[in-house]
Amino acid sequence: MRIALVRPSMSGVRAGDAMQPLVFALLAALTPSGVALTFHDELVEPLPEVPDADAVALTVETFAARRAYQLADRWRARGVPVIMGGFHPSMCPDEAAEHADAVVVGEAEDTWPRLLADLAAGRLASRYDSTCADGLGGVRFDTSVFAGKRYAPLGLVQFGRGCRFACDFCSIHAFFGARIRTRPVAEVVAEIARRPERMLFFVDDNLYADPAAARELLEELVPLRRRFACQLSMDVAGDPALLRLLHRAGCRVVVVGFESTSPATLRAIGKGANLHADYERVIRAFHAARIMIYGTFVVGYDADSARTPADAADFAIRHRFAVANFNPLMPMPGTRLYDRLKGQGRLIHDRWWIDPAYRYGDAMLVPTGMTPAELTDGCRAARFAFNTPACIARRLAHPAANAHSPANAALFLAANLVSRREIRAKQGRRLGASG
Ligand code: SF4
C-alpha cells in the first residue's frame, strides 16, 4: 500500500520560513514497514498534480484549511481517497468530512495505525477519534521523511503536550486535553543526541508546563552542548537559578506570550502567569541570563484601543525584544473566544479560514474600542515599525542579550531577516490558491 503524506501551505505557495513539520515524522514512525510512504510539503516544494498513491493523508492547520479542501476536492475527483487529520479537522470534523473520506480527530498514536489497517482491509471508516489517554513513553519521530527538503536549519523536538493554563484564545486543552504529559527525559535526550542539528526548537506550547519535568530535562541537556529556542510561560522568570540552568542547557531564545500590557486585557485572556508578573522584572531576568526574547502580543480585546498596537510595539522596541509579533486577536475554532464572539455576532467572517474575502492579517472580529480597520492597520504598522532596518539595529544593540556574543548576534540577525521578509510576504495574502 502506498500513502502520500501532504502538508498544504496557506495559499498554495512556498514559505521562506518553513520548519520541519514534526507531525509527519511522528506519522512515519507509526507507519508499519509494509506501507510505502512519500511526503510532499507545499511549504518547500510544488505538489504533484495527483500524488501517485493509494490514498493521500493531509495534516491541516487552520490557516491552511481552505487550501487543503481545494486539494482534497481535486484529488477525490480523480479517485484518490483523502484522509485529513491535525488541528483543524480535530476542531471542525464535520466541515473536514465534506472534503475527506476519513477524518482523524485528535492525536495520531492510537488512530493512525488503526486507520492504516482498515484502509489495507478495504474498510476505511469515516472517522477515527483519539482517546488521548496514553502517556508519551515510546513516542518516536522518523525524521528521514524530511530528507532532501530545504527547511530552516533547526531540529524540531517535542518534550511534552498540554499546558497548566487555559487562556481564552488558546485551543490547547481542546486538542490535548487538560492533562500535561511529558516524554521520558532519557528518550528525549537520546533522540537529541542522534540529531545532527546544532540548533533545536522545542515545539511544546509551554516547555515549562510541568516545572519539575522541565528542570529534569534541562539538567540532562547541559552535557549535549546544543543550542535551542522554546516557548515558555513567563512564570519561569521567577526562578533565577532555573533561568541560569536554562542558559547552561543551551537556551538562547524564549518565545513568550506577553499578549498585552493592559491588566484588563490580561484578565480577559485569563493568562495566570502574566496576571501576577512584573513585566520589567521578567524581561530583566531573561536578559540577565543572556537569553533573547521573542515576544508575542494580541490586540482586539475590549480594553484595547487604536493606540494599543503602537504601544505594544514601543514596549517591545524599548525592551530590545529580539523578535516580536503583533497580531489581531485570532478566534480559532475550539476556543472560548471563538464561541463567545460567535454568540455575540462579532465575527466578521463566521468561518474566516474558508472565507475567500479574508486576508492574512485582517481583523477577524468587530472590536469594541476601535474599528476593524484600525485593528488591522494598527497591527500591520506595529509589525512594520518593529522590523525596519533602523529598529533592527537599535534592538541588536543590547549588550546583555542580543549582542552578548557573536553567536547570539548571528541568531538575532538571521531571525530578523526571516521575520522581516515573511511579514511582507504574508500580510494581505488570501487563504487558499487562486484560480
Ligand atoms: S500559556 Fe500558552 S499554551 Fe498555555 S493555555 Fe495560555 S496560550 Fe495556551
Image (cartoon, grey):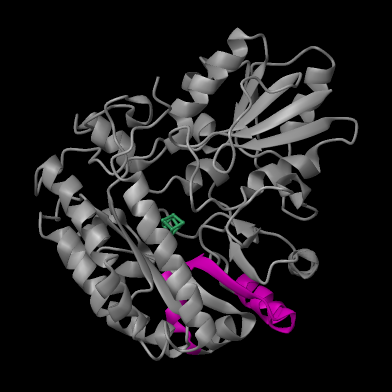
- Residue placed at 22% from the left, 66% from the top? 313
Q: Ligand 1 shows up in which quadrant of the image?
A: bottom left
Which quadrant of the figure contains the N terminus?
top right
Tell me, yes or no, if residue 167 can be seen here. Answer: no
Give the side of residue 214 with respect to residue 336, left or right: right
Relative to 163, say whether 229 is above or below.
Answer: below
Farthest residue to the right: give it.
34
Q: Which residues are magenta?
A: 212-240
Task: Please state the horizontal and vertical placement of residue 303, each as a whole percent of the image.
Answer: 14, 55
- Along the line of sight, which residue is nearer the eye, 3 or 347? 3
- Residue placed at 26% from the left, 61% from the top? 266
Which quadrant of the figure contains the C terminus?
top left
Relative to 260, say whether 424 is above or below.
Answer: above
Task: Please state the horizontal and vertical placement of residue 36, each as a whole percent of the image.
Answer: 83, 31
Give the side of residue 195 with respect to residue 382, left or right: right
Relative to 62, say whether 20 is above or below.
Answer: below
- Residue placed at 73% from the left, 16% from the top? 124
Q: Quick check: is 239 in the magenta stretch?
A: yes
Task: Please state the horizontal and vertical placement of residue 383, each as a whole percent of the image.
Answer: 27, 58
